[in-house]
Image (cartoon, rainbow, N blue to C red):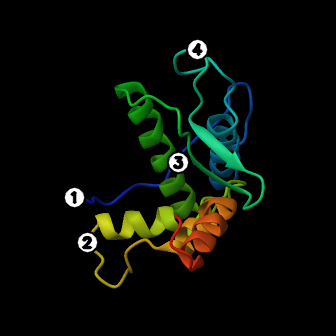
Amino acid sequence: VKVTAARRLAAHFLRERGRGLGVAREFLALTMEAFMTAKNGQHLEEGQELWDYDKESRTFWFAEDLKASAQALQLFRAVGVLMAQALLTGTRLQVSFPTLLYSLLLRHLGAVSVAPPGLADLAALRPCLAKGLQELLAYEKDDV
């Protein structure tokens, strides 16, 4: 994995005088909101969405029915770039991902201190599914 130094985003809006960090932060917030709330048919084939939002955990995750495509990968990469720029500029984005995503990214970058994904990660991602799996694991009868 190649990691390179990044430069801070410089942005300005047409017909507006503002420039600088505040404008970059506003741009990042608006752009991330657009990516996360894209309606069906925008950016992808009709009926596809990039993200699933879990109301119980209040987090976003990759849409389960999304077909892998070069276009979808480009959009996910763009979201990653926006998140990196938000880190560089100290911008708080109104989007929440489960810690599993960050753990997977760190493991992909070679971090050895990050534990492999487990049931607790599933519980943060899909609480109902994790609860059912935990109950199944705790089930002691042999009729399953």
* Residue 110 visible (yes or no): yes
Q: Amino acid at mark 3?
A: Leu
C-alpha span from label 1 to label 4 = 33 Å
Quarter in which the N terminus is drawn? bottom left
Q: Residues within 10 Å of mark 2 (few under 14, many from 20)?
A: few
Q: Are marks 2 and 1 in contact (CB under 8 Å)?
A: yes
Name the mark nearer the viewer: 4 or 3.
4
Question: Residue farthest to the bottom?
Answer: 113
Residue 1 is marked as 1
Circle 2 residue: 110
Indicate the secondary structure of the residue bearing disc 4: loop
Residue appearing at x 33%, y 70% in the figure = 107
Question: Residue farthest to the front?
Answer: 143
Circle 4 residue: 46
C-alpha span from label 2 to label 1 = 9 Å
Indicate the secondary structure of the residue bearing disc 1: loop
- Looking at marks 3 and 2 on the same chain, the residue that comes earlier in the sequence is marked by 3
